[in-house]
Amino acid sequence: MTPEARAKNIKVLIFDVDGVLTDGQIFVIPNAEGNGIEAKPFSAHDGLGISLGRLGGLRIGIITKRNSQTVAIRARDLKLEFVYQGQAHKMNAIREILQKTGYTLDQLAYVGDDVIDLPVMRQCGLAIATANARQQVKAIAHHVTPNAGGFGAGRDAIDFILTAQGTLEKVIEQYLDESDSSAASADVGTGNM
């Protein structure tokens, strides 16, 4: 089955975070108490892509091994439906998401970049690797994004799925229509987190 054929069936899209929605760097800034404040760079292209994905009917979330207040804040701003942190074994969260939604593994796409993502990518309907993914991940992916994590790979994944489903251009026009209330409700936050 072609990657495009797989993408036509996708209803749920799940992203890893570090190396996928970020470039994989983790900045630790010391505070006055001697603890670290974590910061990560996210791409605005991915944020707008998530709005488009929602308008296109995708249910979107993240699963990450790390626990991070930075990720929690960004997930809230992106209005993600599924947010799972501290997940060393990501299939547990996948099973819970599928149970909540009633969808099946073949209706789920997953975007990953490193070996921790392999168990999900080996089983999901559409496995997407970022351009910066480890070779083991690219080897099993159905599709590899043209851009690296943190530089629009999330948007690439959404554009690929919506293009395969024949809805990308319609969804973009819907997003741009200021009189369309569904576009406003699908949009991400305005920052000021």
Image: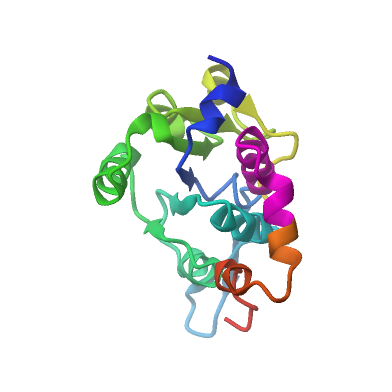
**Residue 52 visible at all:** yes
Left or right position of 11 against 43: left
* For residue 94, above or below residue 180: above
Q: Position of residue 156 (x, y in %)?
A: 69, 42
* For residue 133, above or below residue 76: above
Residue found at x 41% / y 35%? 107
Say whether residue 146 is magenta.
Answer: no
Left or right position of 105 against 95: right
- On-image quarter of the C terminus: bottom right
Residues shaded magenta: 152-172
Say whether residue 154 is magenta.
Answer: yes
Residue found at x 31% / y 49%? 101
Q: Position of residue 173 (x, y in %)?
A: 75, 58
In the depicted view, which residue is nearer to us: 173 or 47? 173
Q: Main secondary structure of the magenta part?
A: helix
Residue found at x 69% / y 33%? 131
Q: Position of residue 116 (x, y in %)?
A: 43, 34
